[in-house]
Image (cartoon, rainbow, N blue to C red):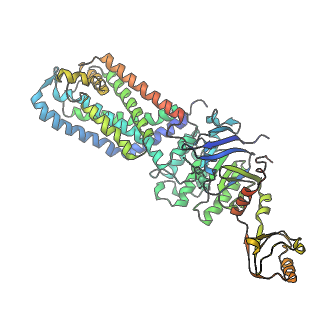
Amino acid sequence: MPPVIDIQGVTKTYKGGHQALKTVDLQIGKGEIFALLGPNGAGKTTLISIICGIVTPSTGTVIADGHDILKDYRQARMKIGLVPQELTTDAFETVMATVTFSRGLFGRPPNPGFVEKVLKDLSLWEKRNDKIMTLSGGMKRRVMIAKALSHEPDILFLDEPTAGVDVELRRDMWELVRQLRERGVTIILTTHYIEEAEEMADRVGVILKGELILVEEKTALMTKLGKKTLTLNLQDPLTALPPELSDWDLTLKADGHELEYVFDSNAERTGVPSLLRRLSDLGIAFKDLNTRQSSLEDIFVSLVHRDTPPASAGAVQ
Amino acid sequence: MTFNGWGVWALYRFEMARFGRTVFGSLVTPVITTALYFVVFGSAIGGRMEEVGGVPYGAFIVPGLVMLSVFTQSIFNGSFGIYFPKFTGTIYEILSAPLSPLETVTAYVGAAATKSLIVGLMTLATATLFVPLQVQHPLAMIGFLVLISVTFSLFGFIIGLVSNSFEQLQFIPMLVVTPLTFLGGAFYSIDMLPPAWRTVTLFNPVVYLIDGFRWAFYGLSDVGVGVSAGAMIAFFLICLSIVGWMFKTGYRLKN
Ligand SMILES: Nc1ncnc2c1ncn2[C@@H]1O[C@H](COP(=O)(O)OP(=O)(O)OP(=O)(O)O)[C@@H](O)[C@H]1O
Ligand SMILES: [Mg+2]
């Protein structure tokens, strides 16, 4: 099955010379939920904006549902819905008017029944005659989602859908994503939160400084993220690791003052108690110890410092 | 789909709805302004000037007044319509919609021109309360009115695209258009000027527009109606090509 989105060699250099995207290749399968993870300024919004026609790529091609987004932009864009990162709404419009407007704008004939369903799904029906400016931030975000869904898109982009959103709306959002997936809608979302990717995505792409450095099945990534680091501050520095400790994956840090052990916190045996016992047997004393969950940031850092070229990005499973 | 009719209609309706919300201000202002012009120019000056080319002065200034409100409204509506979504960020939706540049312009400029047409007709209606009017060439009158509304709405649209701040949005209308209009023969016939000024005046494009429009009312023309019509069409085509070029290059809309 051909991918529903096929991104080939896309780069973007903004006016002023900032290169926001370095050669991105990515394929997304139909019905897939794809999470794009990355720190601020990584280029997530830029990539999404290119696919949606808001930003012009400097090079490369994007095919959406078989249509080139530049040459065949009409067909491509009709298939796509976008919920942007920023809350930008027409303050003076009513909820109903703005959602109906969006549907028409994307070339669909009026369908009050469908608009009603979208508004009800998003708990906006009661507010349909309210002016948008009278709504709370979370409600405004729902309105933006309703607008994006109003023309029955097959591909939905959610740019940080849960930024500034309370727990309840976040849960609603996840529920909505699941429902849309059942209807076969392909969803691409960006987030800073690994838990969000964990909750929703089938596949995760990590983007860093404009480079897609990793694309992996969520399950595989979660294993990597399950790592923890134990740091021991040694009483007396070590010059080298004693051979007796070769069973553990250890590194010496801070001129031999620190011993670091990376382990899988999900594993049956973490190896921590046995390591501590072995150290005490060897007479290696420590002043302090702490353990730390590898954060997304650590993964980024380790990925960046890895000398091997980026993992083969993009294969559709 | 070769033409996104629903999209154009939705955008047009959206723009007209904004006009509807401010309909009181949009219509009352030109009415009051027109009435004031008549009090000041019509009565105060007109009392001493009697007739221009056989037309009572009060009636002579009507076409110019209508043009004045059509210019101002078209530029304001045209520029504001596209500047506002740029300013608030809602432009993202227009840019991501399956609309061709031509369709986008049609909707925005169509709505802006419709509004200024309504205001122009309101102004005309107000004028009839003060002076008896005759329109010798009604079809030409409507034709000119539509053409000028569309052209200046396009011109406004360009200003809205180029502008990066509200100051810039007001700069061109304030600094260029208003003086050109006042010096464009709205309140006098250019025959009344000394010869040197008359020559200078011929470089003012607004002269041709007002002159042609006045011809439609009274059959009076300083420059010839053909020249006027030609100038209007030329200005329209220039604005259209500029907008076309801007969209093609994504100028100031896309990064
Ligand atoms: N219009 C623009 N002009 C110039 N540079 C831009 C523009 N938009 C974005 N950039 C730059 O491109 C880079 C990527 O920005 P982008 O918005 O795509 O990041 P992001 O991954 O979405 O970040 P965030 O998580 O903060 O939303 C940033 O360095 C940003 O400053
Ligand atoms: Mg972003």
Which residue is nearer to you in this view: A154 or B239?
B239
Compared with A253, B107 (above or below) is: above
Q: Is residue B234 left or right of residue B127?
A: right
The quarter of the picture where the C terminus of chain B appears is top right
Q: Position of residue B79 (x, y in %)?
A: 40, 39
Q: Is residue B133 left or right of residue B233?
A: left
Which residue is nearer to you in this view: B17 or A220?
A220
Q: Quadrant of residue A77?
A: top right
Residue depicted at 44% across the width and 45% down the height: B84
Q: Position of residue A112 (x, y in %)?
A: 57, 46
Q: Quadrant of residue B142?
A: top left
Compared with A177, B164 (above or below) is: above
Residue depicted at 57% across the width and 56% down the height: A142
Q: Is residue B6 left or right of residue B164?
A: right
For residue B35, say whether it is visible: yes
Q: Is residue A17 left or right of residue B81?
A: right
Q: Position of residue A21 (x, y in %)?
A: 64, 46
Q: Residue furthest front?
A: A239
Which residue is nearer to you in this view: A65 or A243?
A243
Q: Position of residue A53 (x, y in %)?
A: 60, 41
